[in-house]
Structure formats: C-alpha cells, structure tokens
Amino acid sequence: MAKPLRVGMIGYGFMGKAHSNAYQKVGRFFPELEHRPVLAALCARNQEKAQAFADTWGYESVETDWRALIARDDIDLIDIGTPNNTHAEIAIAAAEAGKWVACEKPLAMNVEEAERMTAAVEKAGVPNFVWFNYRRVPAISLARQVVEEGRIGKPFHYRATYLQDWTIAEDVPQGGATLWRLDVDAAGSGVTGDLLAHSIDTALWLNGPITSVVASTETFVKERVHQETGQVQPVGIDDACMFLARFANGSMGTFESTRYARGRKNFNTLELNGADGSLAFDLEDPQYLDFYEYTRTDTGSKVEDHLAGWRRVHVTNFEHPYMDHWWVPGCTIGYEHTFINALADFLKGVETGSPAEPGFRAALETQRVCDAVLQSAREGRWVETGLG
Ligand code: SOE
C-alpha cells in the first residue's frame, strides 16, 4: 500500500507547473515507489492567482503565507519554486519543522546561504533535493554511464554552452513576479546562477570537481524599468558569462552562457573529449547522445579505421536510463519528463536509504563554483573554488 506524501508547493510560476506535474505523474510511471505524492496545498501571496493555479492542478487547499504552510501538520514535503532570494529562509524553516525539502535551482543566492541551508537539512536529518533536472535527461544520464564505464578514458576537455535570447530588447523590464530573474536582488546573479548553474551541475557530475576558474561577465543593457517601482533602475545581473575551468582530473573546461544569442532559445550543450572517446549532447535535440569511440573497452583495440565516425544514439530503448518507465522504443519523452524522472530518483533514494543527487550538499558545490566565477569576473583573476 503506497504511503501518501503530502506536498506543500510554494510558487506557481514556470517551475511550480513543472514540479506539480511531476508530483501528479510520478506514481503512474514509477508505480514501484512506496510514496504517492498528494497535492495538499499551494502557497503564494496572491490568493486569487494561487486559487486559480490550485484549481487547475488539483491542489486540495491554498495558503498565502509560507510560514502557515510549514506550520501545518498535514504537510510532509515543502517544495520551493519561488525566486532565489527566498530559498534560504524557507528551506531552513522547513527543515527545522522536520519537513522534506525539494528546492528549485540554484540552491541559494550565494555560498553563505547555501552553507546554512545545507547545515539545516543535515542537522534536521530531513530528505532534501535540488531540481537540477537536466541530469535526468536520459541522454545525459547515458553520458554519465559511458563515463563510468571508462569509455572516454583520460579526459582532456569539457565544453559547455547555455544560450538563450529573451532579454535582448532594451524595453524588457526587470523584477516582479514574471521577470525577477533580471533583478539582482531577487536572483542573486544573471546567467551564472540561472543557466551556468545547470551546466556546472552537469559538469561536476560527468567530469568531477572544478578546482579553479577565470571568468568574464557582461551586462549589455545597463538600465531597465523595474516592474514593482515603475522606475528605471540599474541592472545588476550578468547578461553573459564566459569562464575557463580547471578540473581536478587534469582536464580543462570552457563554459559560455548568455541571454543575447539571437535565435538560441534553450541551447544547452556539452562535449567531453577523452583519450579513448568523446561525447556530445545538445538539449535542442535531446533524444540523442553522440559518441565517438576510439578505443574499445572490451578488447582495448583501436577502432579508428576507414569507417570511423561519430555514432548517434537514439536514447529511447528500454535499456537506456529511465526509458523502461515510459513508452516503447523509438517513442520520445520531453522536458517535463526530466522532472518526473528526478522526483522518482528522489523518492527512491529516500526509500532505499541511498539519497539521490544532487541533495543540498552537492548543490552547495555548484554554488561554490558560481561564486568563484562571479568573484573572478569582478577581480579579473583565477579563483580557487575550494573543491577537489
Ligand atoms: C531561464 O530562462 C530558464 O527558465 C531557467 O530558469 C531554467 O532553469 C531553465 O531550465 C530554462 O530556462
């Protein structure tokens, strides 16, 4: 008999939808899980909008004060889908109340907050998880499997890009419920925390700790109208960020992110080059993992002959990560399923006693890299991350 897991969801934006959908579907596609999420309460400051969202998604009740939500005995898990500047206070209060905590990325505004959040969930001993959903794209999980199988060999290069184009117009305002990602007080940073945090999380997972970085950032539009004050205010976020990285395994990395790459909507790519093989992935073509095999792991023989070439793996077979929970081979899954896969891993981790990553401690490592990147950009020098 499945155990109900009563979810209190805070926030109803893009991530509120993605997370709510995951709670609704996970039990249907991962029926072996012992826990069955129940959409118990939706919390947001605007009662009318909260009620509308709750009605659409089937939440049982609505709260307008997150402290009241956390105080409820009938809530087991707090999901934080609110702007970054609220994550720390909510997560710490939820942990102290003994709730499970699932937090949207990036974990925090900075390392200091992320450390306090990690200490709080660990002190309380509560299950915790950060929604770095791209790890759960089957092709990216397969990339990790290929690395673990030793098919890449000694890694030399890691290359990541994360490009979008939605803030190019100068009349896009900043702040408020819809555009808080452009307001440094709500977001903490621009593309570094919003987009590169994803790239860094994936890189740490696939290629190990990043030990040092040197970065450059740019803010192309210096002032924007703030939606809450109606005033033209300075823009404090990084619109674009590029950094070089050194990994503990001796490889070098390049990372590039911007919201000014005209035509790039959610272009999130990675490439890993090793002595024995290479891997490449592009989120705009998410069903595929590209693999170049130079050395066969079974025989050790080199496979570079007149038919050598990149292999394009359509990651939809039952033997591919997560795909035995979805459709028949050849039928694809999409963006929303990565959240369902992530939630399934989180619940399974709690049930088996082997917690799914990234929990808060792993997300703190990503935060350390983000902070080092921003510090490097400010100071114009290489900065150690403290990892590795
Ligand atoms: C930014 O545009 C954004 O919505 C990020 O905040 C998400 O994390 C990313 O996955 C899609 O783009």
Image: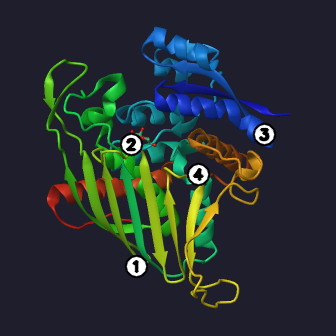
- The crowding category of the residue bearing disc 1, from other C-alpha atoms within 10 Å (few below 14, some 14 to 19, many at least 20), is few
Q: Please state the horizontal and vertical placement of residue 182, each as a whole percent of the image.
A: 28, 35
Q: Amino acid at mark 1?
A: Gly
- The crowding category of the residue bearing disc 3, from other C-alpha atoms within 10 Å (few below 14, some 14 to 19, many at least 20), is some
Q: Amino acid at mark 2?
A: Ala
Residue at the farthest right position: 1
Give yes or no for contact between labels 3 and 2 (Cβ–Cβ under 8 Å).
no
Residue 381 occupies which quadrant of the picture? Answer: bottom left
What residue is pinned by disc 2? 108
Label 1 residue SS:
loop
Question: Which of the image's four quarters has the N terminus?
Answer: top right
Label 2 residue SS:
loop
Q: CA distance from mark 3 to mark 4?
A: 23 Å
Give yes or no for contact between labels 1 and 3 (Cβ–Cβ under 8 Å).
no
Q: Nearer the viewer, mark 3 or mark 4?
A: 4
Residue in the image at 49% along x and 78% along y = 274
Residue in the image at 25% along x and 29% along y = 172
Q: Nearer the viewer, mark 4 or mark 2?
A: 4
What residue is pinned by disc 1? 250
Is 370 placed above or below 344 here?
below
What residue is pinned by disc 4? 137
For residue 34, the mark is 3
Q: Amino acid at mark 3?
A: Glu
Give yes or no for contact between labels 1 and 4 (Cβ–Cβ under 8 Å).
no
Question: Which of the image's four quarters has the C terminus?
Answer: bottom left
